[in-house]
Image (spheres, grey):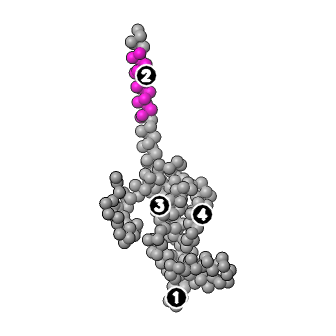
């Protein structure tokens, strides 16, 4: 019923991630309300999602669910929320994320990467395959030239993304929980009042 008549293009999906068409405020509010429906405290839900989103800015492709869940468990956050948060890293956003952490990593290390050949979308996959089949020596050059700078460059993105997601989501989830608690309390008071009125009416009729 609420689906779009036409599916947005891939470029539109990428653009909406970096600059949502409905606005960051409305987009964050919608996300916060969806998370708020999960069982857990505002801290655990917001922190869980933030860890999942933050780990997506690391080059550990294929391990984001695992590492996000471990961080959520260590900091007593919601593991399910962390799994949802890893959706920040997806086939449409990874090219931008990898390019950003790669260049920032080289800048932080003070290296010149003009002649290293750069990296491609297959670099991390090749690294994993070669590591398991041929051992560390076969991937040492790739790690030194590509993955290590990406790992270093991911640190500021990890911290920044965690902060950006955690604080707004925690506030929205807390607001949602408070509003729901008030609604439940009002409904409970209404039921008690209705039951009391019915009981009083029965007593009066018997009299």
Q: Distance of mark 3 from mark 1, alpha carbons? A: 34 Å
Specify which label sits upstream in the sequence, 3 or 1.
Answer: 1
Q: Residue at x 37, y 61 (%)?
A: 24
Tell me, yes or no, if residue 171 can be seen here.
no
The local crowd at label 4, few if under 14, some if 14 to 19, many if 20 or more residues have their Cα within 10 Å, is some
Tell me, yes or no, if residue 170 can be seen here.
yes
Name the mark on residue 66: 4
Q: Residue at x 53, y 60 (%)?
A: 83
Specify which label sits upstream in the sequence, 2 or 3.
Answer: 3
Specify which label sits upstream in the sequence, 4 or 3.
Answer: 4
Q: Residue at x 46, y 40 (%)?
A: 181
Where does label 1 land, which residue?
117
Name the mark on residue 189: none
Q: Compared to 41, does 189 lie above or below?
A: above
Q: Position of residue 160 (x, y in %)?
A: 49, 67
Element class at badge 1: loop
Mark nearest the camera among 3 and 1 is 1
Specify which label sits upstream in the sequence, 4 or 2.
Answer: 4
Q: Compared to 16, does 203 lie above or below?
A: above
Name the mark on residue 165: 3
Residue 196 in the magenta stretch? The answer is yes
Query: Do callouts 2 and 3 mark residues in contact (Cβ within 8 Å)?
Result: no
**Secondary structure predominantly adopted by residues drawn in magenta:** helix
Element class at badge 2: helix
Depth check: give the residue in front, 17 or 169.
17
Look at the image and give the residue range highlighted in magenta: 186-202
The local crowd at label 3, few if under 14, some if 14 to 19, many if 20 or more residues have their Cα within 10 Å, is many
Q: Distance of mark 2 from mark 3, alpha carbons? A: 46 Å
Name the mark on residue 196: 2
Q: Distance of mark 4 from mark 3, alpha carbons? A: 19 Å
């Amino acid at each position: 019923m609420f689906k779009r008549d036409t599916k947005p293009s891939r470029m539109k999906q990428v653009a909406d991630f970096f600059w949502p068409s409905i606005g960051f405020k409305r987009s964050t509010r919608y996300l916060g309300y969806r998370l708020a429906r999960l069982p857990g405290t505002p801290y655990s839900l917001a922190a869980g999602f933030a860890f999942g989103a933050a780990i997506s800015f690391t080059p550990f492709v294929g391990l984001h669910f695992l590492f996000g869940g471990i961080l959520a468990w260590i900091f007593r956050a919601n593991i399910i929320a962390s799994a949802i948060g890893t959706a920040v890293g997806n086939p449409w956003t990874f090219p931008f994320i990898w390019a950003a952490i790669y260049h920032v990593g080289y800048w932080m290390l003070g290296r010149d990467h003009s002649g290293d050949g750069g990296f491609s979308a297959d670099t991390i996959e090749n690294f994993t395959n070669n590591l398991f089949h041929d051992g560390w020596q076969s991937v040492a050059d790739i790690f030194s030239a590509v993955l290590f700078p990406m790992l270093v460059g991911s640190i500021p993105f990890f911290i920044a993304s965690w902060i950006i997601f955690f604080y707004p989501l925690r506030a929205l989830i807390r607001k949602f929980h408070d509003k729901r608690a008030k609604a439940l309390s009002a409904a409970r008071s209404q039921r008690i009042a209705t039951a009391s009125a019915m009981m009083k009416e029965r007593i009066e009729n018997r009299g």
